Amino acid sequence: MTASGSPSLPVKTVPSPRQIRSTPSWGNWRQRLRLWSGLILFVFCLSHFSNHALGVISVDAMEKASIWHYKVWRNPFGESLLLVAAMTHVLLALWRTARRRTLKMPRWEFIQLVFGFYIPWSLVPHVGTTMGLANNFGFAPTYHQMLTILWPEHGVTQSLLLLVVWSHSMIGLHFWLRLYPLYYRLRFVALAFAVAMPVLALWGFIEGARRLELAKDVKVKVSEAQFDWLTTFVIEGRAVVFGLIACSLLVILFRYLIGLSARRLTITYPGSLAVRAKPGATLLEISRINDVPIASVCGGRARCSTCRVKVFEGEETLAPPEAAEKAVLTRISADEGVRLACQIRPLQNLGVQPLVPVKVTSETSENLKDAYYWGVEQEVVVMFVDLRNFTRITESQLAYDVVHLLNSYLDQASGAIRSEGGFVDKFIGDGIMAIFGMDNNPGQGARQALRAAKRIEAVMQSLETEKGPQFSDPIRLGIGLHLGPAILGRIGVAGASGGLTALGDVVNTASRLETENKTHGSFLVVSKAVIDAAEAEILEAENAEINVRGKEIPLQIFAVNSLDTVKIPEG
């Protein structure tokens, strides 16, 4: 059923952002190559920083551990792997930067980009010392030698480099791993590790360097001529790094200047919002340039599907999906016309509908701040309440008595729903449709819905007392509760106010559960999904399974006669 109570066509839902996390995509071959090269560099940094941390014990402990570190990374294979990974990661990052049509991006992307520029620039002297002097002059970059060279003159810059490298790695790992359920469960352990490792590494680096400085018994085995070579290497190396970064940024500027005179196309969003854009940019970039919010959990790497949009005009002008986009769309069983905003590059006018809710900022234009103006997909709990045998109850009654009873019931029941944080979607004759969990998570929404059902049970008892002798039949209510993804949007209005409703299988199923009360003679029929999300305990209920149209797996339900038998956690 729809909110109006009339039958509707089945609405095919897509996975919620929580469900997306369990089945991420690996992106295209360039993104996979960049990811794997980054993971190799991360393993090297983890090994190196762990070695630093042993300085808390002694410099000798650092030296002994470095023997194993160098056995892995300073042999011909390890050194070649490290150099290839570093060059691949940097060049692909610069290539991706040059492909951008705008530098407007989420804060985390901008920080990672800036850190990515800073790292090779600051790393040149360190690479020149540990690898350049070693390969050209036979210098042994032991901890005794390196700590003496670096401390105290270069202590601050070296510490800053360590923090930037680690932060860059953690940002990249977080936005890759957060698509996986295991990482979500272990996120606090991961956070503790992310904070502890650089603290221990810096502690060991500083402690070891201070001990050597106090001892003053280490002679630096680098001649003046070798230092001159190193100075030249640093100048030339940084010139190359600066040139590559400048080229990638100049490409963005060049495209911008060329685009000033290029033809324009129009992108139309819901609510007749239209923006002008130049061909070549991705839809995600166009949206960011014009401050139109579109979700992008993976940062535009075709992994998460959160930037998906429904193309309702101009789909035929788009290039077919490439392998990475096609894999994501297949995984989420996307309907025809659904594309990823980070992958499509409009060449002609386009009309689109974003499909995933996004957080907006205070700078976002007013008509975009209401996510339901766009239509969003979200996990919610849907409640249907119905007054049993209403026709029989009202037979031969005065119109005044009937209207008074109905208004009293609707007023008290809707008040019970609102008092627990629910949203009254519609009054459907003698029935009510409500939504819980719109402003919080599904667990809280499920608990609110169960508490609202308990309040409505009290309303039923109150109505039975107040109804008067003219109504001979008892007042009985029935409630159905189900949790699942629904499409929430403002239907049938031009503006952003009013008309909010829910569509989808969860609505149809909740309505079906409400009618199941007639079969089981119960007050509440609730799906197991609601009970599990609420972490509630049912002491007494009839457990059953029902077949829902369009579903292969039967739905497990609980038929409850009284909410006194249901223990609902706080929160």
Image: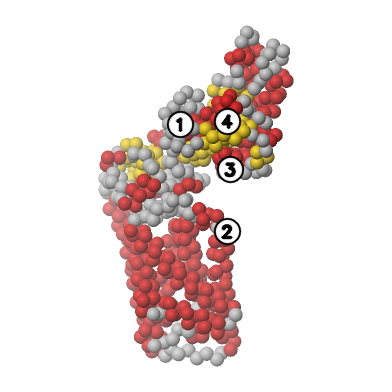
Query: Which percent across, then down, holds residue 489?
Result: 47, 34
Label whose residue precedes the other's in the sequence (3 or 4)? 4
Q: Where is mark 2, residue-wise? A: 188
| Secondary element type, mark 1 | loop
Is residue 351 left or right of 422 when viewed as pictured? left
Identified at 53% across, 28% down, the residue is: 511
Q: CA distance from mark 1 to mark 4?
A: 17 Å
Label 4 environment density (alpha carbons within 10 Å; few <14, some 14–19, many ≥20): many
Foreground of the two, 325 or 307: 325
Q: Quadrant of residue 189?
A: bottom right
Q: What amino acid is found at the position of numbered circle 4 in the picture?
A: Gly
Label whose residue precedes the other's in the sequence (1 or 4)? 4
Q: What amino acid is found at the position of numbered circle 3 in the picture?
A: Ala
Query: Which percent across, then down, holds residue 450?
Result: 63, 36
Q: Which numbered mark, 3 or 1, is in the foreground of this view?
A: 1
Foreground of the two, 411 or 106: 411
Q: Which numbered mark, 2 or 4, is in the foreground of this view?
A: 4
Identified at 54% across, 34% down, the residue is: 545
Q: Are the residues tagged 1 and 4 within 8 Å (C-beta)?
A: no
Q: CA distance from mark 2 to mark 4?
A: 37 Å
Q: Are the residues tagged 2 and 3 within 8 Å (C-beta)?
A: no
Q: Where is mark 1, residue-wise? A: 549
Q: CA distance from mark 2 to mark 3?
A: 21 Å
Label 1 environment density (alpha carbons within 10 Å; few <14, some 14–19, many ≥20): few
Q: Where is mark 4, residue-wise? A: 480
Q: Which mark is residue 533?
A: 3
Query: Which percent across, then down, holds residue 261?
Result: 27, 49
Q: What amino acid is found at the position of numbered circle 2 in the picture?
A: Phe
Identified at 47% across, 57% down, the residue is: 177
